[in-house]
Amino acid sequence: SSGAAEAPPLGGRAGERASGRAASGEDERQQRQPVVKSVLVYRNGDPFFAGRRVVIHEKKVSSFDVFLKEVTGGVQAPFGAVRNIYTPRTGHRIRKLDQIQSGGNYVAGGQEAFKKLK
């Protein structure tokens, strides 16, 4: 009678859960979903610009240069093409796409240096 207590649970779903197949299949699907980040970008030195939301979809924005082009179109800066992205408080220059955090705020600049606003 001790063998019956050790028997695996009956039924297809319970068997899948015990083997881990169902759980790992869901994890793999989540990992394959494309990364999408949404950030708020301001114009360098423009205290009146309310900011523009820019969505970074990894399938469309494959590199930092492509991101700079997206921001250039989004903020319609009077200085022309966006060449630099900065953090708003410290003016730290962002150089790679993976440094950008979803929900973050950033400052778009051209060739000029970061301009700190009050």
Image (cartoon, helix red, strand yellow):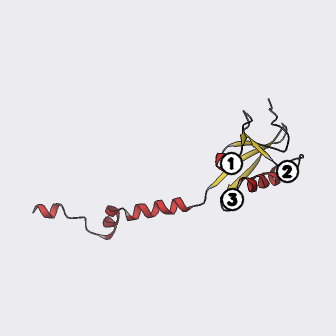
Pointer 1 residue: 96
Q: Is residue 102 visible?
A: no
CB under 8 Å between discs 3 and 1: no
Vertical comparison of 111 with 15: above or below: above
Depth order, front residue of 81/77:
81
Q: Secondary structure at mark 3?
A: loop
Specify the quadrant of the image occupied by residue 14.
bottom left
In the figure, 13 relative to 77: above or below?
A: below
Q: Amino acid at mark 3?
A: Ser
Q: In front: 28, or 112? A: 112
Tell me the CA gap for discs 3 and 1.
11 Å
Q: Label 1: few (<14), some or many (≥20) within 10 Å?
A: few
Q: Which residue lies under the disc numbered 3?
A: 62
Callout 2 secondary element: loop
**Residue 87 percent location from the top left of the image:** 72, 39
Q: Position of residue 116 (x, y in %)?
A: 80, 32
Inter-mark Cα distance, 1 to 2? 17 Å
Seen at 65% across and 52% down, the residue is 37
